[in-house]
Image (tube, rainbow, N blue to C red):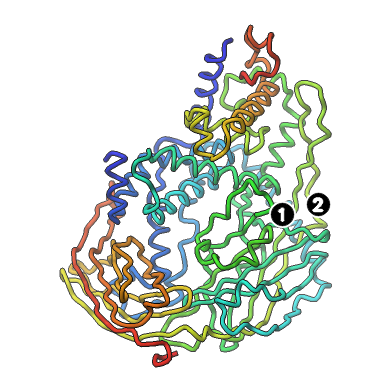
């Protein structure tokens, strides 16, 4: 079933439409949330809650707009909020992980390990939830900066600034991989990865 | 390395990382479906056809516990086996913390219920924010704010202020062999909140509807919560950061008198783990943050008791109907209509169907005087009828029923087409049964 058909069915009150949307975007939603929260149960919870919200508020959805960016932006927002709340009181398990990072992992080793997904996991963990959200919207969900600005209802300059700070932080964390290109030598901190 | 290549690599790594921990075959639909059903069952709909009781007991309202966690944890267990030791260490640490808290709290008075005068009309009184009922424990102050009550719902809000007067959120640990998960949940080792009345009747706590607000961070949106819609008049409480909300459903068997003198047992659980980054350095790369350890002295794990009176909503009235309509071989009984200042609730019981299986409504429509809901997918029977149309000739139409067979893959859907039509009169509030 295509997205538009699923939305139309759901708008008619057919829960099968929701099931189709879940099968189309469920995994992607959980993954997007996971990249921000680093917590699988919480990510599933966020995705489920987002679909429940779709079910309850489908009347408010404008069929003239693509569903996926509208929906996934909500997921990212929820994940960011959850991550903010969660990191204000850090879980014990994460304390363990952070301590491990703090004591055992040399930043150069982390950089050399960039070729593994573990390296990006640890690098993302050092970003703020807002920075992670920006990275996920731009590079995982492939929204352009102008789309991000529209979806987040913030000025384009704000999006650019968030992305720049996130990329700058990644560059600090992963210097061996993110070695500046030739242009970067001319303009420091341009926000290039 | 140019920018494009860098961005491509970042995209690829993000996908690999996400895919590593969230597999392609992840299935979340059953959990979502269960939650939809659970919400519906909280309002008497979707009741099994085999039930002989016309109304739902509180047992039936109990949501499935963590149904969506089990497959996940198995999967996690396979992937992160080395984390088991860490999880066990965290578990031991938490038990020690609870022990310290219990010892500390032993000397403190735990019951300081302070009755206050209850508002006459809860809906209109709610935004007025009368003074909270307060109790203190270990330097923290628990403020219990006025409550919202309508048929089938009692919402209680509270805040917990730390010794500096800042509201703090509540987090609770979920433990398994590997992890300690912290989520918004007031229960610590002292169990779940419990609301009862002086007749010993216990309301059911809607565990999944625990929520809290966080307006202290302007960039964050309003709290996402199932009960957000119920709290639109709660201007008093939403002005505070970290307001916790508890949602209870009173027992609905028969027509008991409303809950009046309430007795709330409120767990208060405050683990404090604080991330303290070292002073930012200008060196590159930036220094790794350090952590302070858990401050066990800050842990509060107690069960406070509040006693307070609650008047029933004087504008609430119930129209008993008990009308049964049959179509497509299935019967639906409209038990009653409950009108409160907040909303209108039609209590439906889904009876026998041709295959003997429970069905749920797919769509329904309510016409009340000049007002109509249109066809809505809401399954809980709640409508927001304007005050001017809360009496007179009403028509409730259920258009279609459906059920899913979750034992098949993909789920198999069966529908029954109606309509089931109920025409009835809602008398003015004064002439109805309170």
The kind of secondary structure element at disc 2 is loop
What is the quadrant of residue A111 in the picture?
top right
What is the quadrant of residue B86 in the picture?
top right
Q: Position of residue B327 (x, y in %)?
A: 17, 72
Q: Nearer the viewer, residue B104 or A190?
A: A190
Q: Nearer the viewer, residue B329 or B430?
A: B430
Which chain is disc 1 placed on?
B
Seen in the image, is B312 located left or right of residue A102? left
Mark 1 to mark 2: distance in Å?
Answer: 11 Å
Residue appearing at x 60%, y 74% in the figure: B126
Residue appearing at x 79%, y 45% in the figure: B293
What is the quadrant of residue B53 in the picture?
bottom left
Q: Position of residue A34 (x, y in %)?
A: 54, 39
Seen in the image, is B6 located left or right of residue A7? right
Mark linked to residue A5? none
Closer to the camera: disc 1 or disc 2?
2
Which chain is disc 2 placed on?
B
Q: Nearer the viewer, residue B346 or B105?
A: B346
Residue appearing at x 48%, y 84% in the figure: B315
Q: Position of residue B60 (x, y in %)?
A: 42, 72
The outermost residue toward the bottom is: B431
Q: Quadrant of the C terminus of chain B?
A: bottom left
Q: Position of residue B413 (x, y in %)?
A: 24, 55
Q: Which residue is tagged 1?
A: B94
Q: Nearer the viewer, residue B419 or B67?
A: B419
Task: Tell me how many marks there are.
Answer: 2
Q: Which residue is tagged 2?
A: B295
The outermost residue toward the left is: B328
- Quick check: can you spot residue B178? no
């Amino acid at each position: 079933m295509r997205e538009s058909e699923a939305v139309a069915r759901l708008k008619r009150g057919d829960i099968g439409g929701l099931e189709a949307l879940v099968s189309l975007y469920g995994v992607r939603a959980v993954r997007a949330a996971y990249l921000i929260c680093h917590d699988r149960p919480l990510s599933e919870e966020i995705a489920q809650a987002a679909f429940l919200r779709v079910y309850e508020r489908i009347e408010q959805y404008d069929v003239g707009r693509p569903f996926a960016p509208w929906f996934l932006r909500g997921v990212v927002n929820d994940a960011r909020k959850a991550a903010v709340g969660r990191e204000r009181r850090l879980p014990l398990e994460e304390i363990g992980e952070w301590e491990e990072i703090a004591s055992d992992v040399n930043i150069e080793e982390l950089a050399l390990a960039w070729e593994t997904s573990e390296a990006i996991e640890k690098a993302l963990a050092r970003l703020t939830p807002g920075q992670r959200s920006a990275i996920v919207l731009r590079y995982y969900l492939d929204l352009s900066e102008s789309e991000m600005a529209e979806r987040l209802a913030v000025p384009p300059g704000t999006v650019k600034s968030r992305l720049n700070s996130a990329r700058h932080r990644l560059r600090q964390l992963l210097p061996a991989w993110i070695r500046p290109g030739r242009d970067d030598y001319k303009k420091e901190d341009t926000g290039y990865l | 390395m140019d920018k494009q290549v860098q961005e491509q690599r970042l995209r690829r790594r993000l996908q690999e990382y996400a895919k590593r921990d969230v597999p392609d075959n992840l299935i979340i639909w059953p959990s979502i479906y269960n939650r939809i059903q659970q919400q519906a069952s909280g309002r008497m709909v979707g009741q099994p056809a085999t039930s002989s009781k016309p109304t739902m007991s509180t047992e039936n309202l109990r949501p499935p516990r963590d149904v969506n966690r089990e497959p996940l944890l198995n999967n996690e267990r396979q992937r992160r086996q080395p984390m088991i030791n860490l999880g066990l260490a965290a578990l031991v640490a938490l038990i020690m913390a609870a022990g310290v808290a219990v010892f500390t709290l032993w000397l403190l008075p735990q019951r300081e219920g302070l009755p206050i005068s209850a508002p006459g009309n809860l809906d209109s009184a709610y935004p007025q924010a009368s003074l909270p009922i307060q109790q203190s424990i270990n330097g923290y102050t628990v403020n219990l704010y006025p409550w919202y009550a309508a048929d089938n719902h009692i919402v209680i809000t509270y805040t917990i202020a730390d010794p500096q007067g800042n509201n703090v959120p509540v987090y609770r640990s979920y433990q398994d062999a590997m992890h300690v998960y912290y989520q918004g949940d007031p229960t610590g080792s002292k169990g779940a909140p419990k609301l009862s009345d002086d007749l010993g009747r216990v309301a059911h706590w809607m565990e999944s509807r625990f929520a809290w607000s966080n307006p202290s961070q302007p960039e964050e949106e309003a709290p996402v919560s199932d009960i957000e819609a119920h709290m639109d008049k709660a201007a008093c409480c939403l002005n505070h950061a970290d307001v916790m909300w508890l949602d209870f459903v009173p027992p609905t068997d028969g027509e008991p008198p409303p809950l009046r003198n309430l007795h709330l047992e409120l767990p208060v659980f405050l683990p404090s783990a604080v991330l303290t980054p070292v002073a930012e350095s200008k060196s590159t790369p930036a220094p790794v943050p350090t952590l302070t350890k858990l401050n066990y002295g800050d842990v509060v794990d107690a069960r406070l008791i509040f006693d307070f009176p609650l008047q029933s909503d004087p504008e609430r009235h119930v129209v008993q109907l008990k009308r049964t309509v049959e179509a497509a071989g299935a019967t639906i009984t409209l038990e009653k209509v409950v009108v409160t200042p907040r909303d209108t609730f039609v209590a439906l019981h889904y009876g026998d169907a041709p295959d003997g299986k429970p069905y749920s409504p797919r769509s329904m429509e309510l016409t009340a005087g000049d007002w109509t809901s249109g066809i809505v997918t809401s399954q809980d029977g709640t409508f927001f009828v304007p005050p001017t149309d809360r009496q007179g000739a009403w028509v409730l139409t259920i258009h279609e029923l459906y059920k899913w067979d979750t034992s098949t893959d993909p789920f198999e859907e069966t529908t029954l087409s109606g309509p089931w039509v109920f025409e009835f009169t809602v008398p003015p509030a004064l002439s109805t049964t309170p």
